[in-house]
Amino acid sequence: MTALLEVSGLSVAYGAIEAVRNVSFVVEEGQIVCLIGANGAGKSTTLRTISGLLRPRSGDITFQGRSIVKEPAHVILNRGVAHSPEGRRVFARMTVEENLLLGAYSRKDESGIQSDMKRVYELFPVLGQRRTQKAGLFSGGEQQMLAIGRAMMSKPKLLMLDEPSMGLSPIMTQLIFDTIKELQGQGTTILLVEQNALAALALSDRGYVVDLGQTTLEGPGPELLADERVREAYLGT
Ligand code: ATP
């Protein structure tokens, strides 16, 4: 296995608030890796730093063996790292199709864009049926599908999903997690941030527990799922 993404000794602060402290983890090519942990543990900050929206205080991030830690966000996106942020953030006044095309803005391969759009509509038929409607009219679950679809449109090697199940019904959550598995089957590597530890670990090849800005436990998803400490802290059992 080759490491697609390697985060080593990453520390990130907002002024005096140290949000991420010396975090290290590896995402191998083809894997689903999840970061789980309580509110405010530093998971979203880690993703924002990987995608170049924040600069770390120290540490390194390599993607395909090259450091991206000093690159601007658009270069990181062009290298193949897509980020579906927490809270959906779709463009409410734009149609489904326009939102998806924005995800592909840096691409020039028109036929590839069209076939990837078709793929998004196959994964999420409701988006295809309503492709000319404004995204603001959609339910939370549908907006989440659109946010994931938009991230897929950049044709990423690594797809980072921040809380894809947030605020969704159990049925919708299941659909999103099934889709994540399907995307992996189609060759996309996935870095997932989730509070729904049970569903995320069940799906993941590897999981990391983040607590107060530090990784405290790591292992294969199913193994962490069986770990007493994880069960007590995050699964309520
Ligand atoms: P959540 O799931 O609640 O988003 P998280 O694990 O993703 O949790 P972060 O959002 O990364 O955690 O937040 C880590 C810490 O950094 C928290 O203490 C949070 O209050 C703080 N923080 C996050 N964003 C900012 C910001 N823009 N300015 C100042 N502090 C921030």
Image (spheres, grey):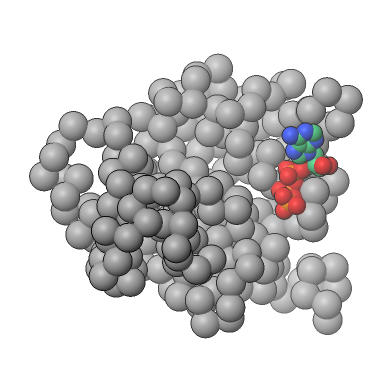
- Of residue 26 and residue 114, the one placed in the foreground of this image is 114
In-image side of 149 versus 86 (left or right): left
Residue 101's spot in the image, x, y percent? 28, 44
| Residue depicted at x 85% and y 73% | 232
- Of residue 137 and residue 178, the one placed in the foreground of this image is 137
Residue 155's spot in the image, x, y percent? 31, 44
| Residue depicted at x 83% and y 23% | 15
- Of residue 209 and residue 156, the one placed in the foreground of this image is 156
Q: Quadrant of the C terminus?
A: bottom right
Q: Residue furthest right?
A: 16
Residue 196's spot in the image, x, y percent? 67, 68
| Residue depicted at x 44% and y 41% | 82
Question: Residue 16, located in which quarter of the rendered image?
Answer: top right
Q: Residue furthest left?
A: 111
Reply above or below: 146 against 139.
above
Reply above or below: 70 against 209.
above
Residue 148's spot in the image, x, y percent? 43, 55
**Where in the image, quadrant-wise, is ligand 1 located?**
top right
Total numbered labels: 0
User: Is residue 1 visible to the viewer in this orientation of the structure?
Assistant: no
Q: Residue furthest top?
A: 70
In-image side of 225 versus 147 (left or right): right
Question: Residue 50, located in which quarter of the rendered image?
Answer: top right
- Of residue 170 and residue 79, the one placed in the foreground of this image is 170
User: Is residue 165 visible to the viewer in this orientation of the structure?
Assistant: yes
